[in-house]
Amino acid sequence: MLSFSYMVNHDHSTTNGHNDSSSRGLGIALIITLAIMAVEIVGGIMSHSLALTSDAGHMLVDALALGLSVVALNLAKKPATSTRTYGFHRAEIMAALANGVTLVLISAYIFYEAYQRFRKPPTVQTSIMLVVAIVGLIANLITMRLLHHERHSNLNVRAAFFHVFGDMISSVGVIAGGVIIAFTGWKIVDPIIAIVIGVIILWGAFSLVRESVDILMETVPKQIQLDKVTETIKNVNGVVELHDIHIWTITSGIYALSTHILIRDQMLSHASEIIATINRELEHKFNITHTTFQLECEKCDNCAQGLVCQIQRPEETKSH
């Protein structure tokens, strides 16, 4: 069986540019979060507001998460080594997963605090509570604006965005609760709003954790359909069939593929043309930029069925 492997690498200066922009946005978001956290701690003490104090604790966790995201993005820019041949891109996904788990814990804490407030609603000075909450809301909206664009192309920034979004919802809840309590005296409104906040954060957390786990498990990216990729490769002139195909995500926006391709017996120069055509099609249609192909001119009997090769025993390899 005649076979050889071919791998194409592309310039990722655009990706590095996204990382630089994301890192700057996260750094500014971290500074704003720490500043508002300090304001909320002071405001919570002055107004005796458990809601503000709890939200300050929420923002402390978010500040830690944002700091982790900044570190992860800087690690992702480090070059590959002889032991980490993909570089440190997966640090971004690990940080996103950690952030998602943190969001779940935050939601659990909010539910616990809501239960405590149902039992014994706190008495607060609503004027101070409202002023501090409004300042926090404005700061959160500014931070969300900073992260809005990058969150679509970077899972780690999306994790940070969800943290800030949770802060924003918390600020809205605190403001709404403060207004209602000020005009009606209904203290039970506070834990009800807290539960709504927890559900919203939990929804985003589950989505984030699921997507992070899918990447770590090297699942086919959800926007890429395996059958369409297979069909695209088979339609290239000179390709007979393919098998043992794998598609996975290295990090946000960087997709990889490896497969065995059976081609017609021909000159090596023609094989190179086939590979170049396949790469152009994969990048154009699916944004797959890292590919590894093994070209075969003889059919492997073990791969007659299905897309994944069966493992051969040592004695069986003699037949090839």
Image: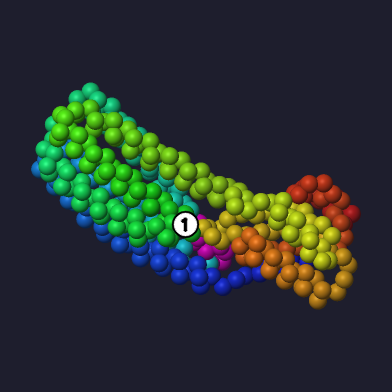
* Residue shown at 74% from the left, 55% from the top: 230
Residues 234 and 7: in front is 234
- Classify 10 Å Cα crowding around label 1: few (below 14), some (14-19), many (20 and above): few
- Quadrant in which the N terminus is drawn: bottom right
**Residue type pointed to by label 1:** His
Q: Is residue 173 left or right of residue 301?
A: left
- Exactly how many numbered labels are in the figure? 1
Q: Is residue 186 magenta?
A: no
Q: Position of residue 113 (x, y in %)?
A: 27, 32
Residue under the point 23% across and 50% down: 136
Residue that badge 1 annotates:
152
Residue 84 lies in the magenta-colored region: yes
How far across and down, in percent of the image, does residue 133 sit?
20, 46
In the rendered image, the residue lying farthest to the top is: 119
Residue at 38% of width from left, 36% of height from top?
A: 199
Q: Residue 69, image x and y in percent?
A: 39, 56
In-image side of 30 versus 82 (left or right): left
Name, please, the residue furthest toward the front.
183
**Quadrant of image for the C terminus:** bottom right
**Over which residues does the magenta segment extend?**
81-91
Dividing the picture into quarters, in which one does residue 257 lie?
Answer: bottom right
